[in-house]
Image: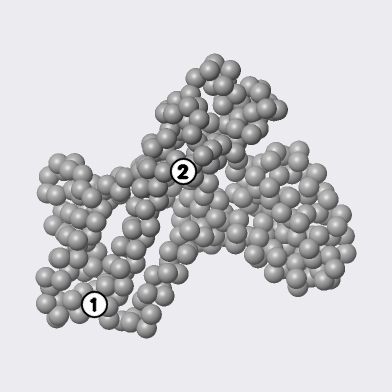
Amino acid sequence: MCPQVILTDRDLALMKAIEVVFPNSINLLCRFHINKNVGAKCKQHVVNDLQKTIDTLWMEVVWASDEVEYGQRLHQLEQACVDYSGFINYVKDTWLTPHRHRFVGAWINRVLHLGNTTTNRVESAHWKLKQMLGNSIGDMVKCWEAMNNNLRLQLGNIRASFQKSFYEVENAHVSPFYGYLRGSVSRAALRRIAEELLRVDYVGTNRQICGCTLRTSYGLPCACELGRYRVGGIPIPIDAVHVHWRKLTMEVELEIGEDDGSEVDMTAAMDELWRRFRSLDVVGKRALSCNGLVRLLTSPNHICRAT
Ligand SMILES: [Zn+2]
């Protein structure tokens, strides 16, 4: 299945490959990295006093919520940069002209990205793994142990956050309006809905005023939709929430032999992989190449796959 949205850095080779392999996916770019690059360029080209102003104007371009606002914000940025053609040319040639539809609000708000607009989450996981690997690079046994510990730690954290979503109700979500969602939807989603609810007073049920970004980009009910539930006197239906926010368990599908579709706990799957690894003798472990590791993870016909 083709992913709807793929988030990357501006790695041109990778972006080209995505275009070929996943022609129907939308390749968004990580905002955090773009802003970091633009910030560094600004420091190089612009005098101290103006750096903060220009940085703010740049952020306003990035967050512009429609194309008209984008045009206005860009014009303001250009005016502020009349003496810094090197900087404004870089911003336009490297980022805005070729890639604005991949990171500027006006375009990405139309895409169901479920809140993933930076790659930081993946990178922090990668960073943590690198810390745990420490100086044991080259020793397969130690690397495997470090990766295993790292995954278990992450699983523990995710499980704890799911547990919280199950059992703890925040004050803001006590209202019967959330009745169908409590315990079935992540707290992160409930918080976004509660925030959106504040807009209902001036949006009412008007789609034009609403803009419906929360619906389009996050798969969550936007202000005008919430307004309609409120007018109708009905609680928010569970179907109004994208399945992404309803996944509060850690099950994975482990295909064993014939695809019997049996569901097992993620921890059990990792225990099984760990057991298989330990059952190899030292020579076998040392001899494990990268391909061997993949085979160990997937053989015989065992594929560990998140559902
Ligand atoms: Zn709306």
In the rendered view, does 63 fall on the left or right side of 82?
Answer: left
Colouring rule applied to residues = one colour
Q: Amino acid at mark 2?
A: Arg
State yes or no: Cβ of the residue under disc 1 lies below 8 Å from any atom of ligand 1. no
Q: Residues within 10 Å of mark 1 (few under 14, many from 20)?
A: some
Compared with residue 256, is residue 227 higher up or lower down, i.e. above or below?
above
Q: Nearer the viewer, residue 88 or 194?
A: 194
Residue depicted at 49% across the width and 45% down the height: 188
Counting from the top left corner in percent of width and height, residue 261 is at 19, 41
Alpha carbon separation for disc pair 2 and 1: 38 Å
Indicate the quadrant where residue 292 lies.
bottom left
Q: Quadrant of the C terminus?
A: top left
Where residue 187 is drawn, which disc sits there? 2
Counting from the top left corner in percent of width and height, residue 141 is at 24, 77
From the viewer's perspective, is the residue at label 2 or at label 1 nearer?
2
Counting from the top left corner in percent of width and height, residue 44 is at 76, 73
Q: Nearer the viewer, residue 283 or 52?
A: 52
Where residue 141 is drawn, which disc sits there? 1
Q: Residues within 10 Å of mark 2 (few under 14, many from 20)?
A: many
